Amino acid sequence: MEVILVIIVVSVLAVILGVKVIWLVFGFAALIGLAFAASMILLTVFFIRLLFTKKHTASFSRIDKSPKSRFKVAYYTIDGTEYPNIFPEEGFLQNKLYPGDKKHTVFLTRNRKYVYDKFACTTCTIGFLLSIATIIAGIFTYSHI
């Protein structure tokens, strides 16, 4: 929310100081492009890290604050050791998405700090594939201009 407020204040000040609106539109488009590129890079890194994990059977233990961030994550127990999920938990339908009475297939990272559950795997895979499709579409569009 603060980011939107800062963008609005900077835009209003720029218009008052005489910056043309078209330059503000270009700047806003550049910010969106940078955010999109950053998310593509992040999802690609997570997907590559997912390729080097080992498959394990785990049980869901709890949802609690992540040790490295301010978000809540799902914790899974593998052979008596508890590991946090790499992505934040889904904030809705927790009883349906994270049932504690059944076994889950998770992927444990090499350094044994995090796991990828089925939601993290889906997010990484779809994000990576959409990133590749977007890059191909951008190259195709740019080459036919």
Image (cartoon, rainbow, N blue to C red):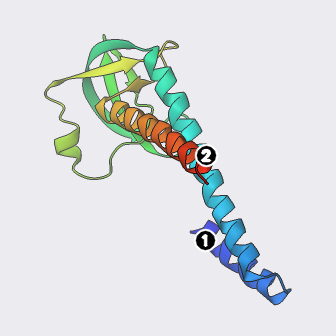
Is residue 58 at all visible to an observer of this figure? yes
Q: Nearer the viewer, residue 141 or 37?
A: 141
Residue positioned most to the front: 144
Q: Residue at the location (18% across, 44% down)? A: 95
Q: Amino acid at mark 1?
A: Ile
User: In the displayed structure, does residue 137 sit left or right of residue 126?
Assistant: right
Q: Nearer the viewer, residue 144 or 6?
A: 144
Image quadrant containing the N terminus:
bottom right
Q: x and y percent of residue 136 in the render?
A: 51, 40
> Label 2 crowding class (10 Å Cα cut-off): few <14, some 14-19, many 20+?
few
Identify whether 118 is placed above or below 137. above
Q: x and y percent of residue 101 in the render?
A: 13, 28
Q: Residue at the location (18% across, 31% down)? A: 100
Residue positioned most to the bottom: 16
Q: Residue at the location (73% across, 84% down)? A: 12
Circle 1 sits on which residue?
4
Q: Secondary structure beneath disc 1?
A: helix
Cα–Cα span, label 2 and label 1: 34 Å
Q: Residue at the location (33% across, 47% down)? A: 90
> Label 1 crowding class (10 Å Cα cut-off): few <14, some 14-19, many 20+?
few
Which of the labelled discs sits on residue 143, or is there none?
Answer: 2
Q: Earlier in the sequence, mark 2 or mark 1?
A: 1
Q: x and y percent of residue 64 in the render?
A: 39, 39
Q: x and y percent of residue 98 in the render?
A: 23, 37
Image quadrant containing the C terminus:
bottom right
Q: Secondary structure beneath disc 2?
A: helix
Identify whether 65 is placed above or below 48. below
Q: Amino acid at mark 2?
A: Ser
Q: Nearer the viewer, residue 102 or 54?
A: 54
Q: Nearer the viewer, residue 138 or 16?
A: 138
